């Protein structure tokens, strides 16, 4: 934090010391640290409470950003967390994984660093759990209707929670042995520790959501059967089909899709390795694609002990 000649406080994003990098890639703990109380208040006070809050348009959820920023800046953490939870089921996920289009839309970003909205969101979500604000909400009445949600990724989990809180009976189906979808198998531990996911799943079950894993729709049960037994079926299948490249060498040994690499790597990090799974250990790795998934592969390859990693965009 520093002051420019006009007296404005300027937020400076400090990179971690280089000497820490070699330490941080030796384990799977989360890389990003949560703001402390003072830093969160200071950062929230940078919000200008714009007449037209463009951060709202940048946020796909329509989060009430100026409202929770104002409350957080005044130290009213519980009320700020409540405003965040009013529009966001899982701020502990978005506060770690979202690309933060709200910050790109922040007016303050025109001539200086935007408000660190995502970091504030992460802080408030962690405090909401600590203070008991983010507690299970069982419905006060039952509608007598059943909804089956297929897929337990972030979309399926959010749909299941919202529909359950509305009073419907919810059955959540997942084809893998553990629920979570992309959050479980696609996001590395160093970006989202799975204890946070397990905590949220436990909350959903406490609210009355029935989670069934190892159920393959189309094999173990047909979609027609689900439609017949439920009042509604929500398909939250995710985007598991990769986009291929038609280039020479594509079918060569060691060329794999990102998710085919990340899923077993995540299981390895959690102590359940898959025999014969692709690994970057003692390998020279080339990653094609510079987005979040490519970055996940890069961080994973380093932690697996790759000899070198090159990322192409």
Image (cartoon, helix red, strand yellow):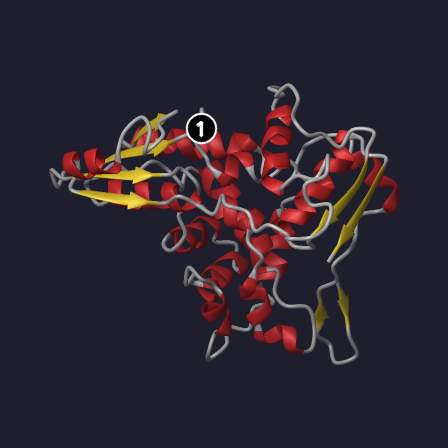
- The answer to whether residue 47 is above or below residue 196 is below
Image height of 202 relative to 240, above or below: above
Residue 169 appears anywhere in the view: no
Residue projecting furthest to the front: 248
Q: Give 241 or 213, whichever is nearer the viewer.
A: 241
Residue 207 x, y percent position in the rendering: 29, 33
Point out the image quarter for the C terminus: bottom right
- Residue 24 quadrant: top right
Count of numbered circles on the image = 1
| Label 1 SS | loop
Left/right placement of residue 177 relative to residue 251 reads left
**Which residue does the numbered mark 1 point to in the structure image?**
176
- Kindly tell me whether residue 307 is visible in this rendering: yes
Which is more toward the observer, 116 or 303? Answer: 303
> Residue 109, percent across and down?
64, 73
Residue visible at 72% across and 41% down in the picture:
299
Q: Is residue 277 left or right of residue 74?
A: right
Residue toward you, 10 or 264? 264
């Amino acid at each position: 934090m520093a002051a420019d000649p006009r007296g404005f406080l300027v937020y400076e994003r400090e990179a971690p010391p280089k000497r820490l990098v070699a330490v941080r890639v030796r384990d799977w703990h989360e890389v990003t640290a949560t703001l402390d109380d003072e830093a969160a208040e200071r950062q929230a006070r940078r919000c200008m409470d714009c007449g037209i809050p463009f951060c709202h348009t940048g946020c796909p959820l329509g989060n009430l950003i100026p409202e929770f920023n104002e409350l957080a800046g005044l130290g009213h953490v519980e009320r700020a967390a409540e405003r965040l939870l009013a529009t966001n089921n899982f701020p502990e996920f978005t506060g770690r994984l979202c690309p933060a289009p709200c910050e790109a839309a922040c007016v303050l970003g025109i001539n200086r660093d935007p408000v660190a909205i995502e970091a504030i969101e992460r802080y408030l979500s962690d405090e909401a759990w600590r203070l008991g604000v983010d507690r299970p909400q069982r419905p006060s009445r039952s509608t007598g209707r059943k909804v089956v949600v297929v897929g337990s990724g972030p979309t399926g989990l959010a749909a299941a929670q919202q529909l359950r809180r509305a009073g419907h009976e919810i059955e959540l189906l997942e084809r893998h042995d553990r629920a979570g979808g992309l959050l479980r198998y696609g996001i590395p531990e160093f970006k989202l520790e799975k204890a946070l996911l397990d905590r949220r799943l436990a909350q959903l079950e406490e609210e009355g959501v029935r989670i069934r894993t190892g159920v393959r729709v189309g094999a173990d049960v047909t979609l027609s059967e689900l439609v017949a037994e439920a009042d509604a079926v929500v398909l939250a299948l995710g985007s598991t089909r990769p986009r291929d490249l038609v280039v020479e060498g594509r079918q060569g040994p060691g060329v794999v899709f990102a998710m085919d690499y990340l899923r077993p790597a995540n299981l390895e990090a959690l102590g359940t390795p898959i025999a014969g799974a692709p690994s970057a250990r003692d390998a020279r790795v080339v990653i094609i694609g510079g987005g979040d998934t490519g970055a996940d592969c890069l961080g994973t390859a380093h932690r697996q002990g790759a000899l070198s990693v090159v990322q192409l965009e």
